[in-house]
Amino acid sequence: MLEDLTAAGPLRAFLISADEAFVRQVQGIWPDTCIQWMVFDRAGAAVEQLFSDPPALLVSDAQLPDMTGDALVTLVKSENVYSQVAVVLCLPNEALHAGRDWSTLEADDFVLLPFEQEEFKARIELTLARMTRTLDANPLTRLPGNTTIIQFIKDNIEKRRDFALGYVDLDNFKAFNDKYGFLRGDEALMMAARVIVNTVRSFPGGMNFVGHVGGDDFVFALPLDTVEAACRRLIARFDAIVPSFYDAEDRERGSIVSNDRRGEVQTFPLMSVSIAVVCNRDGSLGHYAEASAIASQLKKKAKENFASCFVIDQRAG
Amino acid sequence: MTQDMRTAYKGRVLAVKNLPTLPKVLEEVTRLMEDPGTSTEQIAKVITYDQVLSAKVLKMVNSPIYGFPGRISSIQHALVLLGFNVVRGLIISTSVFDDMNKAMAGLWDHSVGCALACGEIAKILGMKDPEEYAVAGLLHDLGKVVSAVQLPEIKPELEALVRARDITFLEAEKSLLGFGHDRVNAWLAEHWNLPPNISEAIAYHHKPLSAQLYTKYACVVHIGDFLTRVYEFGNGGDDNVPVFQPHAMKLLGLNQRALENVLDALSDAFLEAADISFS
Ligand SMILES: [Fe+2]
Ligand SMILES: [Fe+2]
């Protein structure tokens, strides 16, 4: 079953463990033509490579000399760009009965040590296969897609939680795409995704969710009291970074000049962000559809402004 | 110097995995990151005192996995895009120099000095992104660090040659390795997908007029490097000042008046920097 995955050459895998006997055992399971292991005895030695050139598979010992395997898994799994790495954590047998909360395990699977070779092999292969059919993540940004977004909103409305939903989109994205092509457009979307993810995450309060509806539309959720500051920070960051995505000439001028279909010259400013924020205060949102209806009304308001801006839904709760 | 040896050296240089750095900046960034109230601006400010950490941050954010290779040349922007989580990972993966390499501490000061000088020149010339000129200045001698780490046996030979023949470090590198640190810079920049402005500036800082697209960047770094040496801020690996190309000033339109302004601003900036030196 590994054949499909290794058709283009051996799978790159990282094995992080200070236990030499364990490492030898793992290396003996698959032929080199199938899985190529890079072995690290400490997490620190692996992290930089893990981040700049991630492997398809990461197998880590739960106890490492410089950090716990759990911490390493969190480091990898909390980033949208690395979520496609299959991560398997190797736990000592006792861990099974230690009463840990398994729902918080961020690894894709775990293996108990000492392991039985056939089981280890089966688990790894199943995990790898599962990664290729994950949920509804956006294929470009790997952020959760529509199904997850709708489920998230429904859940929180049902539980009558207070929260603010930010609907983000990029102004003048089409002009950018038309001039530079869709690959450069994807670059801008990846940048926008990182700016939104890291800005939302920089605010405390737990509920930080970012989803990618598709194209240049994103959604995030934050507690009501932080959303305004978050919008300001998001806009400041996006506006500061976006010029780097244009060619020197356009950046210098601060706009794109192009001819429309009738041959008339048109000028488009650099991309900016519009954010429409819908609030759920004391159960003010009745159901999911209401959220998107309010958002699209607010969007119109936000779009009247050429610069980056946000509009917060001010209905009394 | 045979072609084979040069190729072998190049291979070893580009195989660089973990660049070590000086402990002070590492400690300071770690301390800042423990405080949830720390802003990216604060962290960026400290990181720009360290050429190795800055290079790592730019290498990471410009790696293809993030989806926009070669776009980001500002440390501040890089930190926003990477996020604290990834930066923390980078800090964990960075080790500290061993005693042998501590001898290079002067090169850290030289790099910080050059960054300051480039920033000031860019400001006085009214350039749009003085911070990015400063980054180019900071990284201009990175090739020296990478060579020292990857080719440790060459370093004592280089130093001996510089002393014996009273030549510049660059000339010694060329005669022993077949290439200088400017070449190493060009290879690294390509290998790490660094943006073209930084790439050209560091690859051409010794012959700025040969830079094609970002000649101004190369000229600013060339002058910044020279001024840092004249002020004897830090140490670039040898005692003689690099060969200066006056045409670089002409190309930038840096006249006597503007130069004097740069020199004034630099005296202040260097004094201030000496107080917060991390090396
Ligand atoms: Fe140099
Ligand atoms: Fe220099």
Image: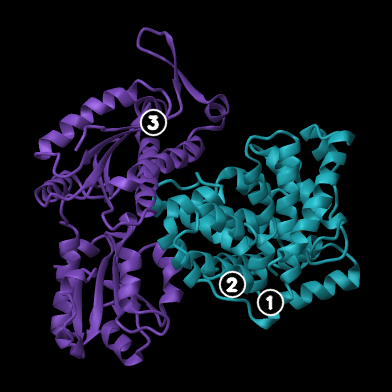
Question: Label 3: how many residues lie within 10 Å, few (<14), some (14-19) or many (20+)?
Answer: many
Question: Label 2: how many residues lie within 10 Å, few (<14), some (14-19) or many (20+)?
Answer: some
Question: Label 1: how many residues lie within 10 Å, few (<14), some (14-19) or many (20+)?
Answer: some
Name the element at disc 2: loop
Of the residues shown, which amino acid type is indicated by label 3?
Cys
On the image, the x and y values in percent for residue B11 come to: 57, 67
**Which image quarter: residue B113?**
bottom right
The circle drawn on residue A309 is 3
Q: Chain of mark 1?
A: B
Asked if badges 1 and 3 are on one and the same chain, I answer no
The circle drawn on residue B20 is 2
Asked if badges 2 and 3 are on one and the same chain, I answer no
Q: Are marks 1 and 2 in contact (CB under 8 Å)?
A: yes
Q: Is residue A102 above or below residue A255?
A: below
Name the element at disc 3: strand
On the image, the x and y values in percent for residue B262 come to: 82, 42
Q: Chain of mark 3?
A: A
Residue located 90% across and 67% down the image: B166
On the image, the x and y values in percent for residue B145 come to: 66, 67
The circle drawn on residue B101 is 1
Q: Which chain is cyan?
A: B
Name the element at disc 1: helix
Q: Nearer the viewer, residue A269 or A125?
A: A269
